[in-house]
Structure formats: C-alpha cells, structure tokens
Amino acid sequence: MAKILVTGGLGYIGSHTVVELVNAGFEPVIVDDLSNSHHQILDQLSKIIGFKPAFYQFDLCDENKLKEFAAAEPDLEGIIHFAAFKAVGESVNNPLKYYHNNLASLLNLLRQYSGKTLNFVFSSSCTVYGQPDELPVTENAAVKPAQSPYGNTKQIAEEILKDAVVSGDAKKVIALRYFNPVGAHESALIGELPIGVPQNLVPFITQTAIGKREKITVFGNDYDTRDGSCVRDYIHVVDLAKAHVAALKLMEGETFAGYDVFNLGTGNGNTVLEVINAFERATGVKLNYEIGPRRSGDVEKVWGDVTKSAKQLHWRAQIGLDTMMSSAWAWEQYLSENPI
Ligand code: NAD
Ligand code: WQD
C-alpha cells in the first residue's frame, strides 16, 4: 500500500483527502502542527475510516523535526502538501508570517526529499489568476500580479516547484489550483473549521443560519454579473479531495513527467445571491442578509475551465451546489451539538 505524506492533513481539505486516500487504497501519514486545526479531527477521521492514521505533530518549518520524521517514515511514495496559512486578509497585515510559513515549509520538504522519486502534489489556488482576461480561465492563462501576500506565496511556490523539477530536486510535481472549496463530508464528522469570524462565504452562511452570526452582508451587488453579486466556481471539498487521488494516480503512471498544473473547479460560476438561494432551498432555512459595499480585493467573476483536468486527470466534479450547501449545514449542526 503506497504511503503518502499528507501535510496539513488535519485541516479542512487535508482531512477530506485523507478519507479519499484510504478509500483508494493508499496509506496516509499526517503531519500537522495544529496551528489551524485540532487534534480531535484525528478522532473524527478514525470514525470515518475505521482506524487512527499515523499522525506526527510538528511545524514543517522546523528542519530538524522534519529530518526526524523522514527517518521514522523512510518509505513514503508521495507527498500532498496542504500545510500553509490561507487567510488573505491576515496575510496583508502579517506578510512575513505568511512568506515564512508557506515557503519555508515547502523549501524544507523539497530539500529533505531532494532527488528522491516522490510524487509531489501541491495545493495552489485560482487566486494566482487574479481577474482573468477570459472566462472560463484555463491553466494557460496569465498569472496576474498577486492581490495579497498569501496569493504571492502560491505564485512563488509554483515557480519554486518548476525550478526544483528542472534541477532534479523534485521528480514529478502537480500543482492543483483550487477554486472555491465548500461543503463537508456526508458523515458531517469533518468539515471547515474557521477559527474566529469566518472570512469565507459558506461558513459565514452556516454560522448565520445556526444563529452564531446575526446576518450576512453580500459584498456588493453592482458588479457586471447576472444579479450584480460576484461570481465564483464553488466546488465540493470531497470532489476536490478525489482530484488529489487522481493526481497521484496520474503520476504513478508512465505517461507523466516533470511538472504540470490543473484547475480544480466545476467549470460553472455561481453568484453570491445564487449561493444564498441554494442554501435556503437545500436546507429550508431562511437567511438574514443585506447588501453591503464591495470588499476590496475581490475579483468580479472567476470560474475555471476544467477540460484539462477531465482529460488528463480523468476527474470531474460530481456534486452540485445544493448538496454543497446541505452538507455544510449538516456539519454546522453537528458542530453546534459537538463543539470542536
Ligand atoms: P486549513 O488551514 O484548514 O489546513 C491547513 C493545515 O495545515 C492546518 O491543519 C494547519 O494546522 C496546518 N499547517 C499550517 N502550517 C503548517 C506548518 N508549518 N507545519 C505543519 N502544519 C501546518 O486550510 P485548507 O482550507 O485545508 O487549505 C489547505 C491548502 O489549500 C492550503 O495550502 C491553502 O492555501 C490551499 N487552498 C485553500 C483554499 C480554500 O478556500 N480553503 C483555496 C485554495 C487553496
Ligand atoms: C466568496 C464570495 C465575496 C463573505 C478566498 C481566497 C482564495 C481562496 C478561497 C485560499 C466573494 C462574497 C464572502 C461574506 C460575501 N482561499 N462574500 N459576504 O474571496 O473567492 O476566495 O477563499 O486559497 O484565495 O481569496 O472566497 O468565500 O471569501 O468569498 O458577499 O460575508 O462571497 O465577496 O464574492 P474568495 P470567499
């Protein structure tokens, strides 16, 4: 059974990917420093997969700890690197924290495993596209100047990975550019765990619906879109997780070499108001929302061209917006009874 290091594996996307790795016959080994997660997620995962996966708690920016880990787990066949800080707003206020954490962790991994034949999957983001010139946005679209230090860490990381493949430090690398991951596992035992006031739309919706927040503000309805609110490509986190398995399988084959990048979205865009309506339709819960001013830094509309992912990863998102909303709601309800 191929052992796969899942950095940030107790986080939102990492934990869902651990489940899909097990479902696909891989053996996940989790490293997480719990800077944005909780040890309890390990127990939640055990309830889903039926056993407690190997877990090492340390900061990947600590070279010595990573060396000790590598000695303890010498037979890894792949790495999925989720571990990073991801709050766009925080990155503007504290750029050095983001550049250090997101890049030092990557560099440590690449140096620790330099020259080893490990398949490497990297968590990138559609944020690298900024406001695309053409929609849907393809992987060949220009990478625009980053809108935040966080987005810049993703752009720089992609460049580092490309250079690492050229130098032979890394053998096979796939960067996955996620659009907007939302929703939760069908068991409602794992999901998004925003710490403090949620920055993202869907956790804000579910916290409003459960009564933790008084109302939602729609950040602008004067954009050039169907109903004036921004458009995004929302993708269920389980679909996203399955794409990581597909990426590993592509690299296990003989046809893949070097470095490549894939969009992970549904290929469709929905407005903020459409998401709110989908939530109300899917759950029967009426949401209290108001229209407010635009949020600075927001792109008006972005959704992905997923042709390349479909053809080469043999993967397509399957889960629709209503299920994205109902699964997010089930997780919020679980959390209200079982705080983590
Ligand atoms: P998350 O914060 O839930 O998960 C990240 C995990 O990594 C956390 O459990 C955290 O404790 C851990 N971590 C962070 N720095 C670490 C370090 N130095 N050493 C060890 N562990 C560390 O975030 P997520 O939403 O699951 O995102 C996972 C990845 O996907 C990130 O790289 C993020 O930038 C990227 N991404 C996320 C989104 C999104 O909307 N969630 C969109 C695009 C890309
Ligand atoms: C979605 C839409 C908001 C909250 C961010 C990061 C990106 C990636 C995914 C890490 C936007 C609107 C939101 C609210 C609202 N993260 N909104 N009221 O901004 O597309 O992407 O998360 O990689 O890098 O930029 O996601 O969920 O914050 O917003 O109207 O209370 O919902 O304006 O149009 P975003 P989001």
Image (tube, grey):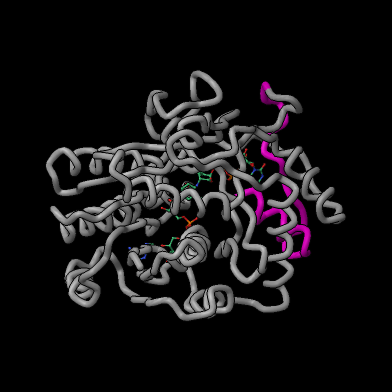
User: Which residue is depicted at the point 40% across and 65% down?
Assistant: 26
User: Relative to 151, is 300 above or below?
Assistant: above
User: Relative to 331, is 174 above or below?
Assistant: above
Image quarter of the C terminus:
bottom right
What's drawn in magenta, residue-wise? 200-224
The quarter of the picture showing ligand 2: top right
Horizontally, is 174 left or right of 233 in the view?
left
Whole-percent x and y of residue 230?
65, 32
Whole-percent x and y of residue 231?
64, 32
Image quarter of the N terminus:
bottom left
Horizontally, is 40 left or right of 94 in the view?
right
Whole-percent x and y of residue 80?
36, 56
Residue 304 picture quarter: top right
Task: Let me know if residue 223 is in the magenta part.
Answer: yes
User: Which residue is depicted at the point 49% across and 80% down?
Assistant: 51
Residue 192 picture quarter: bottom right
Task: Let me know if residue 114 is in the magenta part.
Answer: no
Residue 144 in sight in this render: no
Residue 289 or 141: which is nearer the viewer? 141
User: Relative to 207, is 340 above or below?
Assistant: below
User: Which residue is depicted at the point 73% across and 49% down?
Assistant: 216
